[in-house]
Image (tube, rainbow, N blue to C red):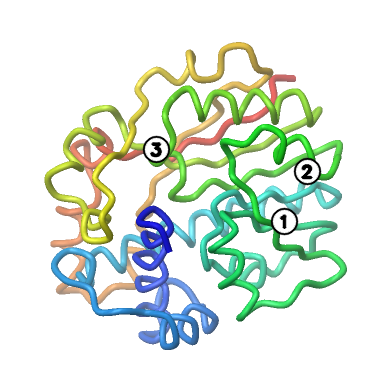
Amino acid sequence: MKNVSRTLFIPLYGKARVSRQGIILHDPDAERIWAAEGFPFRGRAKSKWLAYNMAMRARVFDDWTEAQLKKHPDALVLHAGCGLDSRAFRIRQPYREWIDGDLAEVIAVRRQYFDETATYHMQALDVTDTVQLEALPQSPVCIVVMEGLSMYLTTEQLHTFLQVLHRKYPEIHILMDIYTEFGARASRHANPVNETGVTQLYGIDDIDSLLKGTSLRFKAEYMFTPDHLIRELKPAERVLFHLLFTGGMYRRIYRLLEMESAS
């Protein structure tokens, strides 16, 4: 895999690790895929603290997706940059159509572990390719899951992606994690993805400019590490985890934003 694609193993490891511990996220698919595909990590990438953070992030995305599907049961779900994530099988809420999209080399690996169904599909998708985006299925409502993707796209590429969605879907709901510009600069020196060979990440501060020319508006910001999930850690771990992954400094680096079509 290319370096960017290899970054998917960091959240995969985190989800597999906590699933084995029986906390935060039940993900037997992550466990079996990591056992078959995983490779030795060094340094920060193998940290249990990062594993907890990755699993909590995934759980927040899961809960948001379920809530959206309850409100929009006929929506198309587009998981852009899906990696080897099993969200489509973790959530309990039924869906009309779900597309897991990622680069062709990632989808080739996914097909070794997941099977398509009448409602679940895997698709080679480069989110910087407008032709591929325009060929996505039509739907009156589209729920877009973008976990761990935006920081590999320039602002221009991300803006173009959102513009295509705006033209294609009458109603859109997006949950997306982003680095701030400060966070992207800081990541050059101490980021687990550096261990996969990735050295260039991108950040966003001006969300209004990112959404300019689309029907999208900022709706809400979420915590990656909500208290009810931190309480699943051992009491002795909670204090240090709070220091590492909560508070104002963490938000200066990394944010989780919901956007939707303006009514």
Q: Amino acid at mark 2?
A: Leu
Please name the residue that numbered disc 2 is placed on.
136
| Residue at 21 percent of width and 66 percent of height | 238
Residue 58 location (% of width, % of height): 47, 60
| Residue at 61 percent of width and 38 percent of height | 174
Q: Which image quarter: residue 164?
A: top right
**Crowding at mark 1 (Cα within 10 Å: few <14, some 14-19, many 20+):** many
Please name the residue that numbered disc 1 is placed on.
99
Tell me how far mark 3 sits from mark 2, CA to CA.
Answer: 24 Å
Between disc 3 and disc 2, whose residue precedes? 2
Residue 143 location (% of width, % of height): 69, 44
Could you say whether the residue bearing mark 3 is in a helix, strand or loop? strand
Could you say whether the residue bearing mark 2 is in a helix, strand or loop? loop
Q: Nearer the viewer, residue 217 or 77?
A: 77
Between disc 1 and disc 3, whose residue precedes? 1
Residues at circles 2 and 1 in contact by the CB criterion of under 8 Å? yes
Q: Nearer the viewer, residue 247 or 253?
A: 253
- Is residue 3 rendered to the left or right of residue 147? left
**Crowding at mark 2 (Cα within 10 Å: few <14, some 14-19, many 20+):** some
Residue 147 location (% of width, % of height): 49, 50
Tell me how far mark 1 sits from mark 3, CA to CA.
Answer: 22 Å
Please name the residue that numbered disc 3 is placed on.
178
Q: Which image quarter: residue 22?
A: bottom left
| Residue at 43 percent of width and 64 percent of height | 1
Q: Amino acid at mark 3?
A: Ile
Q: Nearer the viewer, residue 64 or 100?
A: 100
Could you say whether the residue bearing mark 1 is in a helix, strand or loop? strand
Q: Amino acid at mark 1?
A: Ile
Q: Which image quarter: residue 221?
A: top left
Between disc 2 and disc 1, whose residue precedes? 1
Q: Nearer the viewer, residue 180 or 70?
A: 180
